[in-house]
Amino acid sequence: MKMLTIITATVLLTSCQSFRDYFYREGIRPFTSDGCSLSPSGIDDKPYAFLECCVKHDYAYWQGGSLEQKEQADQALQACIAGHSTETIGRIYHGAVSLGGGPQFTTPFRWGYGWERNRGYKPLTSQERYLVESESKKIQWDLIYKSLQEPE
């Protein structure tokens, strides 16, 4: 009977969100960006015209969050790219990230790729926001942009 009580208590405790959060904290990896992933970073006469758009989009994807936040990030990418080229090109990029950027994929550029585990579409907790803010202070944006513009 004592063993059954211990098992029941353990199951109840581990099913509580705050208990799980305490014991299963996960960290966030340092921010990385591959620029526009598998797409061009610009247009013929401006080969890096989209780079800032894509890196900002990567920053949003690195953090992850709710589905609404992903949709906002994807729309911001579309508007940014359209501002540097055409509405059509902006819509093409938007379509690509909408289809291939979900957290269910194992790609290095999926939604929430900064987290050690797939967290799906959930708003960041206060602890996760703190980790994002702490890690964000370490980002050397100029080095990221420079590395993405250097020939390989």
Image: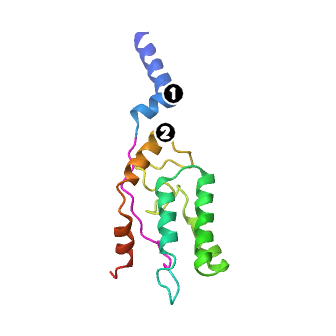
Can you name the residue that lies furthest to the bottom here? 45
- Residue 58 on image: x %, y %: 48, 63
| Vertical side of 96 occupied by 86: above or below | below
Front label number (2 vs 1): 2
Magenta-colored stretch includes residue 44: no
Local SS, label 2? helix
Image quadrant assignment for residue 128: top left
The residue shown at (45%, 15%) is: 4
Which quarter of the rendered picture does the N terminus lie within? top left
Within-10-Å neighbours for mark 1: few <14, some 14–19, many 20+: few
For this orientation, the residue located farthest to the top is: 1
- The residue under the point 56% across, 45% down is 123
Whether residue 123 is situated above or below residue 2 in the rendered picture: below
Query: What are the residue bounds of the magenta stretch?
Result: 26-41
| Residue found 60% across the figure and 65% down from its top | 76
Q: Residue furthest right?
A: 87
Q: Quadrant of residue 139?
A: bottom left
In terms of sequence position, does the residue under pointer 2 or pointer 1 come before the other?
1
Q: Is residue 135 left or right of residue 15?
A: left
| Three-letter amino acid code of the residue under disc 2 | Ser
- 122 or 100: nearer the eye? 122
Task: Name the image quarter holding residue 84.
Answer: bottom right
Is 38 one of the magenta-colored residues?
yes
Q: Is residue 93 above or below residue 115?
A: below
Whole-percent x, y for residue 147 in the image: 34, 73
Tell me the distance, in whole angstroms, between the alpha carbons under discs 2 and 1. Answer: 17 Å
Residue 16 bears which disc, if any?
1
Q: Secondary structure at mark 1?
A: loop
List the residue tagged with mark 2: 126
Quarter of the figure that contains the C terminus: bottom left
